[in-house]
Image: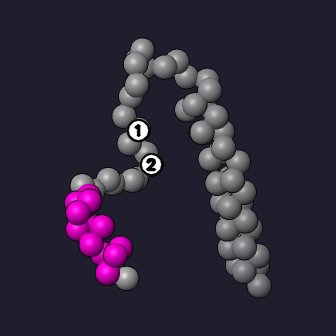
Amino acid sequence: MKKIFLIAFILIVGIVLTFVFTPAKLLTKYFLNDCPTDGPTKQTDFEMYSEPVDLAKYKEQIFSL
């Protein structure tokens, strides 16, 4: 019985710490640090990948619907 409470307590503390430190990490990243460059920089933490688009093929697909 005590082991269940200990495991539950550890999980709850882990979840609470995750929700506390994630916003603090973002706050320091975007507002408390100096800008490393003077111009635009490439953002790598968005995990977005752009692919080239063939507009003629896209137009054919649209009009075929």
As rendered, which of 42 and 25 lies closer to the eye?
42
- Label 1: few (<14), some or many (≥20) within 10 Å? few
Image marks 2 and 1: residues in contact by CB distance under 8 Å: yes
Residue 13 colored in magenta in the image: no
* SS for dot 1: loop
- Most extreme residue toward the top, as rendered? 38
Q: How is the image coloured?
A: one colour
As rendered, which of 63 and 16 lies closer to the eye?
63
Per the model, the C-alpha gap separating discs 2 and 1 is 7 Å
Which x, y percent locates residue 56? 23, 63
Instruction: Identify residue for label 2.
Output: 46
Left or right of 54 in this view: 36 = right
The residue sitting at 40% across, 25% down in the picture is 40
Q: Is residue 45 above or below residue 62?
A: above
Instruction: Identify residue for label 1.
Output: 43
User: Magenta segment, which residues?
Assistant: 53-64
* SS for dot 2: loop
